[in-house]
Amino acid sequence: MDENTDWAALGDSLLDEEKYEDAIKAYEKSVETNPDDYQSWYNKGDAHLSLDQNDEAIKANQKVIELVPDFIDGWNNLSVAYRNLGKYKEAIVFCEKTLELNPNYETGWYNKGRLLQITGNNESALKSLDHALKINPENTDALLRKSEIFLNSEHYTESIGCLNKILDLDEDNPEVWNYLCYAFEKTGKIQDAIAACRKVLSFHVNDLSINLKLGYLLSENGAVEEGYDLIKQNCVLGLGQRLISNKTTAELPFWNFTDSKDSITEKKNANKFFLACILDYQMKVDDVWSHARDFSEKILGDPDNLWETITSESFEDWKSKWRVYKLHKFPHAHERVWMIGKKIVDQYNGDVRNIWKNKDPDTIMHDLFNLVPGIAIPRMIMGALLDMKQIPACRLDVKPDVHVCTVLARALYGSQEKISEQEALEITRKMAPEPLNPWHLDQQLYLIGMQICKARKPECEKCYLADICAYYHDLKLPK
């Protein structure tokens, strides 16, 4: 056995074991010894395809075609690589080359049909898929692609026919049962749709979308209690998964109040940040932070000791300047700034950093609750500190403001009435069970509530939670 054969055989063995990177190295050694070994070039391209390294796969298969112009599998793999890169016109050209070499090349007809389906040429796609099925009536991939085309064009009966043919060959295909569920529902065969859903769940018991689909079908067709239980159980988990997966790395505007994440390590910035947090009560977020900045910098002259400057006035004088300072639209919120400021001066020497510096999260939270009324603002401050890495990593609750409570009420119960703050905390803890962090739900819930799930005119069609939202499905679920 010569050296080339050794490397080629090693590559083949590694390819069979799906050790693609090692297989590529072996084939590179093989073609280095024998540059005309088209089979090693082809197998190298195959390994690159498996790793989604399409450009490298193209280079390898171009070498194959250069060495053996009528090697049909090389042309086919060129087509696959170009399809993966979204270059569909080129991919179709290579498909047609395979069919020119062999008009009975089943894979070529299937791949051409798939490409035509992707590019929206459904009529021609069906013809190509039928060619593949004429060669091999048991080509389940071709039948599945046909069923998709029929589903998307609302030819549900034809789609069901294709799917049933697949089941005759492979009864345990969850994707087929999933499509059948949809097609049966659209044709009014609700009990068949329910049975198809249950079949999918026999393979994938935790499939969120199918559990919800089954819940909706049951609740709308007599089995209300079972349906509602499924919906509520899976909505809680589904909302949590969806919200965390969509968590943006961009911080909310109020976290950008300071120049950098670390700038609240400076006393002056930390105090202005804390003032803005206190003002975050029934005001637009942009107004909250602009008011805090304008008051501190333009009216007070950006003092080193913000809280001492505020409380140097008597409480009565401070109350009288509500309309002058224009810090907040409500007088009692304006008064609260002075009262909290007095505590900061007396208990923390006028420096809010002393609230959290060198303390554990439980102590910080305890001190914030003693300092700031309510539960929403202390939780927001803790979350901000966590985001800006000013406190140790810890599991935190959301800030249960009006936006958060409204989104949860609509998504879980289909209700226009927002849930209580305590309910919001309990629900979000279930949505993000350990080791997940409920705080990581806060940003997305807030943004959805502020931008999409508006009080009077929610824009449900823009919401990525719509498919798992009770309000969107016009359901009224009991708590």
Image (spheres, rainbow, N blue to C red):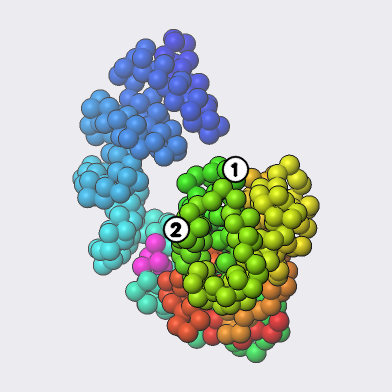
Label annotation for residue 368: none
Q: Position of residue 359 (x, y in %)?
A: 75, 45
Answer whether residue 170 is visible to the viewer in this image.
no
Where 136 falls versus 426 (above or below)? above
x, y (%) of residue 432?
67, 60
Report the front residue among 217 and 179. 217
Q: Secondary structure at mark 2?
A: helix
Percent of width and height locating residue 85: 32, 45
Mark 2 highlights which residue? 298
Indicate the amino acid at tag 1.
Thr
Which residue carries the number 1 mark?
A: 265
Count neighbours of disc 2 (C-alpha within 10 A) and say few if under 14, some if 14 to 19, many if 20 or more: few
Left or right, 456 with respect to 88, comes to right
Magenta-colored stretch includes residue 149? yes
Q: Is residue 31 magenta?
A: no
Q: Observer-nearest residue: 456 or 5?
A: 456
Question: Mark 1 and mark 2: span between their CA atoms?
Answer: 22 Å
Q: Nearer the viewer, residue 453 or 254?
A: 254
Q: Determine contact: label 1, label 2, CB under 8 Å.
A: no
* Residues shaded magenta: 145-150
Left or right position of 387 against 185: right
Which residue is depicted at the point 74% across and 55% down? 346
Residue type, mark 2 in image: Lys
How many circles with numbers are drawn on the protein? 2
Residue positioned 30% across, 49% down in the render: 86
Q: Is residue 334 visible?
A: yes
The quadrant in which the C terminus is found is: bottom right
State which tag comes first along the sequence, 1 or 2: 1
